[in-house]
Amino acid sequence: MSTKTETELPLRQRIAENPQPALVWAAVGAVLIGVELGAVLQVFGALAGVIVNLLPGDPGAATVASLQESLKSIPTLVSRDVIPNQGYWDGSQYVGTFLGLSPAAAWAVRFVLVYAYAFAVLAWLWDGYNRFRRHYRRVDWTPRDDVIDRFRGHSWGEFGLIITIMFVVMAVFAPAVGPTTMEKNILQPYDYEISYFDEETESVETALVGEANIGSGSQGAGDENVGPMSYDDFGRFHPFGTATNGKDLFTQVVFGARISLTIATLSIGIAGLIGLALAMITAYYKGLADMVVVLASDSIQSLPLIMVLILMLVIFQNTWVRELYDGAVLIILIFSLVYWPFIWRAIRGPAFQVSEQDWIDAAKSFGQTPGQVMRKHMAPYVFSYMLIYASLSLGGIIISVAGLSYLNLGITAPTPEWGRLIADGQQYVASPSWHISFIPGVLITLVVTGLNAFGDGIRDAIDPQADTGENETAAAGGGGA
Amino acid sequence: MSRWQYFMRRVLMSIPVVIFGTTITFALIRLGPLDPVSAILGTQYNPEAAEQIRTNLGLNQPLWSQYFDFMYRLFTFNLGQSWVIAPGTTAYELIQVYAPRTIWLGFWSVLIALFVGIPLGFYAGLNPNTPSDYFASFGGIVWRAMPNFWLAIMLVTALSQTGQWTNGFFTWQSWIVKTNVVTPPTLGFFVSPLESFMQNPGEWLNELVRATKQIAPAALVLGSASMGNEMRIGRTAVLETINSNYVETARAKGVSGRTLVWKHIFRNALIPLVPIITGEAFLLLGGSVFVETVFAINGLGWLFFNAAINGDLPLIGTLMYIFILILVGTNILQDFLYTIIDPRVGYEG
């Protein structure tokens, strides 16, 4: 952020001189992370597993597997084990649910707790920044303070931020938020058993999850429907009802949020990196380099976006890339390839402006290499412009992915995707099973509205003079999906 | 540089763009992992038929010669034929059959977007920070965020149910003329329109109304994204113009409110809307795939989608080329409009 001068103390010493605010903050943080330590470690365990899988010969695979198992046994606050909701009615009371509550209430407690926890962590981070600003930062004011103040006065942007946070929390805590798990309900329903209270025999029976699913699908007619906020015949609670095949819709929606978020952020991240790198190169060298990139980006932008996506997904349909993460990896790659020209276009102007500045000449004459000049003296200046454009593009990507999945070209089963859910429920919209198509569509609308609002807020905070140009509008559109 | 020189430069720039865009298409089709011949033959693969098609498509030639052949044919509008979805039919015939429906759809969605989006945006801009402004702005933003395909599904359901919901008071299907909700428009009356109009004007008008009603829901959905954009930009543009100095001057001179709005504000606020309106071409082409699928309109988007999922690669190449031409053409149109409307273009460099 800023360079150190010899007269100033490093951050560690500044904390040592006035340790109290930092200690309080660290203590709160230790509690917050402590209650979720198991989950945090599990993430590292999963990462270790991925790395081991990538290495030739799988060294230490067994060790990692046993490590993962032992990590799973560490209790965490917002987990299914602490607040279970998958119990059953034994005729007089609920068995196996949190405090003997009904499955719906137990699920609601966990849902609320997840969000409370997430917002507590965010509040803690915000408090940490404020403590740093008040007690430890060397200067009283930086331009970033103004950006934050402008954003705090931007209620439309704050609305967007809250929606965005709720969406991200849903994606991150997907396994804990759903009333059941991917594994039990969607991937391997015939490997798990549930107990339920049979009204006819008035006793507790068991059934395979897969069988229960068949008996609780939503396919229109009165009996064949499990609507939002209701129980099915097997005593399982479904906040969003069930899909046509009886699988829990809410679980699919939260995992669908995960894949949408992954695709949107990764594609815009990669496209942003390409765009930023090219903007640096074209602004630094100008002339021929600029001409070539102008031509390439104009040509890619002159292709109809949705058509190219469809074509590429068809062309790569039977390749190994298509199989990775049910198509998500391929989609991310395609999106990065077609989106970088838009980002490059958006930051080309600012990059050219900064390349004309005196400090660039100064850096050059000090003998800094082109790479150093671009990285240290040009990139930070245009980065915020890229952030504006990227945040405004996220919604469009989410809509495009949903659209492609609706056409059965995007994310394939078993990974749930919102667009595919809409396609599944399409023929039942006029029936009592309207929820299958309706809810995911409303959520897409809500999330995209939120992301666009957040993007507007970021734009107005970073660059108050910016005018709403064609570029941004094109970004938020999603190519018409 | 004068304005027209600038415009000519933009036109010349579009030639390499078309070439490069078509090259990308060629690279995807020919260098991608999908073999056109096995895609065409599908399950009925046998070596002889494969060899036959290979020769017909010229796939035995070296790649560079295939490339030049591909480019030469497209640029001389020798568009080839379909191999899978309508074997033997030339692409030209297919486009002749399918394009009118998409053009009809596009025409109405542009019109709806223009005549709803811009007035709403200007209204919101002229009355900023009033409840109706908030309502219009928020409505536009939400409208824009709705996925087209989902909106189309919901609209189809709503329209099909109108009879039941209003207890038979209003039924979309039988309103004015009898139509289905999900249907391609019947555009027969456009064949020699003058003649049939002379013969039976009542019948012709009836057909026109029918075709319009058939396309209206699809056009509303397809126009939705652009409508939201036009509203937003229109609002900002009017707000900026209202606060500019020359409007202040005009007001001080005593220009009446009506003249002020129409002559000084409206015209200048239209300038930033030009790229949004021409940019609709992108949204319309992409959106047509989804909207035509949901509304069962067999237009160009539907044709492209079916050609793609059936592996009709030669037809896809042709269609892609046509789409590129349409989009580049719209870009040139945009520059042309800018050159006429905005005197500032080209002065800066």
Image (cartoon, coloured by chain):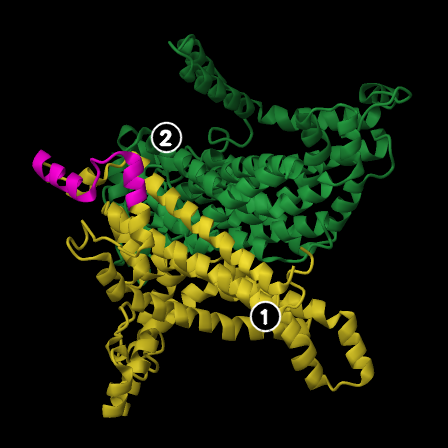
Disc 2 designates what residue? A324
Disc 1 designates what residue? B340
Tell me the element at label 2: helix
CA separation in Å, label 2 and label 1 = 51 Å
Instruction: Give me the chain that's green.
Output: A
The residue range painted magenta reads B47-69
Give me the chain letter of mark 2: A
Tell me the element at label 1: helix
Q: Position of residue B196 (x, y in %)?
A: 24, 86
Quarter placement of the C terminus of chain A: bottom left
Q: Is residue B218 left or right of residue B38?
A: right
Give me the chain letter of mark 1: B
**Colour that chain B carries in the picture:** yellow
Q: Residues within 10 Å of mark 2 (few under 14, many from 20)?
A: few
Regarding residue A419, the answer to whether it shows in the image is no
Q: Residue at x 63, y 44 (%)?
A: A347
Q: Residue furthest right?
A: A7
Kind of residue sitting beneath label 2: Leu
Figure quadrant of residue B165: bottom left
Q: Position of residue B339 (x, y in %)?
A: 59, 66
Q: Magenta stretch mostly in which secondary structure?
A: helix
Q: Nearer the viewer, residue B63 or A199?
A: B63
Which numbered marker is on residue A114? none
